[in-house]
Amino acid sequence: MKSTETFTLTSSTIGGQATTTQAFNDWGSIGENISPQLSWENAPEGTKSFAITMYDPDAPTGSGWWHWVMFDIPNDINEILENAGNVVSNLAPKKSIQSINNYGAKGYGGPCPPEGHGPHQYIITVHALKTDSLGLDENTNPGIVGYNLWANTIAKASIVMYYERA
């Protein structure tokens, strides 16, 4: 019999649209740069750790934009608190690592699309991983983290939110 329970990601602080609460506070954006609360359930059997990414495929870079990369989240964790992406807040799970984003900073960097570029989609994904640790550190760039996630992901679940600067 096939299970109807699927690996699911939800949030109590975001919906289909990002707000100035989540938006970046630099590069011309005026926001609070607060990462969303996230929770997940029904991780697949064999999950040894989790990772979270936030990616904008609409960024005019040719390769998108990584806004948040957190990994080595222990497998007994199923929630990330609001503002846990602020590395000085100490709200992230113990042992988790937040490496650099495409802003060049560690932790969360909120939406900041170019003015007049239209709505951008921000894909927030939790990855269930088959390893306890990716063996990477806080200075690892998003592309290398992404490669290691690709090699170790059992399942993933996502939320998409949109944000536009007129």
Image (tube, rainbow, N blue to C red):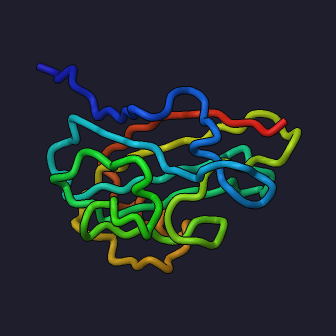
The answer to whether 32 appears left or right of 164 in the picture is left
User: Which corner quadrant holds the N terminus?
Assistant: top left
The residue positioned 22% from the left and 41% from the top of the image is 43
Depth check, front residue: 57 or 81: 81
The residue positioned 21% from the left and 60% from the top of the image is 74
> From this viewpoint, which residue is outermost toward the right?
116
Residue 164 in picture, x, y percent from top left? 75, 36
Indicate the quadrant where residue 3 lies: top left
Residue 42 in picture, x, y percent from top left? 21, 35
Is 67 rendered above or below residue 107? above
Residue 119 in picture, x, y percent from top left? 75, 34
Is 75 rendered above or below residue 4? below
Is 128 rendered above or below residue 109? above
Q: Is residue 147 visible?
A: no
The answer to whether 103 appears left or right of 71 in the picture is right
Depth check, front residue: 163 or 5: 163
Number of numbered discs overlaid on the protein picture: 0
User: Which corner quadrant holds the C terminus?
Assistant: top right
The residue positioned 73% from the left and 50% from the top of the image is 30
The answer to whether 56 appears left or right of 90 in the picture is right
Residue 103 in picture, x, y percent from top left? 66, 66
The residue positioned 54% from the left and 34% from the top of the image is 160
The answer to whether 155 appears left or right of 110 in the picture is left
Q: Is residue 48 visible?
A: yes
